[in-house]
Amino acid sequence: REDLIEVIAERRDLSELLEEEAEIVCFVRELFNENHVSDDSFNALLMRFGEQGIVDLVGLVGYYAFVGTVLNAFEIEPPEGVPHLP
């Protein structure tokens, strides 16, 4: 959803999101900002997706971070007309 993308891109409050979306974004924000995840965030996703779902999510966002790091290191700009993320 476009509004979900905007909340993530602009680092806005999660109260605008559906509960499932907010749990995922909160988990990922904690992981990247604090290098760990609170028990509350972990358990919320564990109940919703199970252990394999958490492993899949962490792998996905880890890969995203890897790609972002490579693009930043080589100063790769997005295509013309595509907005830059903050």
Image: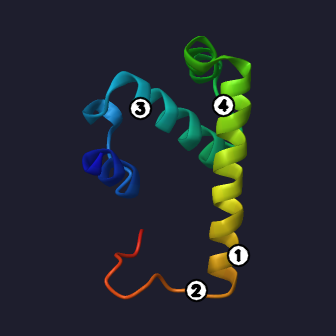
Q: Position of residue 36 (x, y in %)?
A: 71, 36
Circle 1 Cα neighbour tier, 10 Å, few/some/many (<14 / 14–19 / ≥20): few
Q: Are marks 2 and 1 in contact (CB under 8 Å)?
A: yes
Please tell me whether mark 1 or mark 4 is closer to you in this view: 1
Q: Which residue is mark 1?
A: 70
Asked whether 79 or 66 is in front, the reply is 79
Residue at mark 2 to residue at mark 4: CA–CA distance = 30 Å
Q: Secondary structure at mark 3?
A: helix
Can you say which quadrant of the picture contains the N terminus? top left
Specify whether 9 is left or right of 23.
Answer: left
**Relative to 36, residue 74 above or below:** below
Q: Residues within 10 Å of mark 4 (few under 14, many from 20)?
A: some
Q: Position of residue 82 (x, y in %)?
A: 35, 78
Decide which of tag 2 and tag 3 comes sooner along the chain: 3
Q: Which numbered disc, 2 or 1, marks the residue that appears first in the sequence?
A: 1
The residue type indicated by label 3 comes to Glu
Q: Secondary structure at mark 2?
A: loop
Which residue type does callout 1 highlight? Val
What element does badge 4 sit on?
loop
The residue at which mark 2 appears reads as: 76
Q: Residue 68 location in percent, x, y?
A: 62, 68
Q: Which residue is mark 4?
A: 37
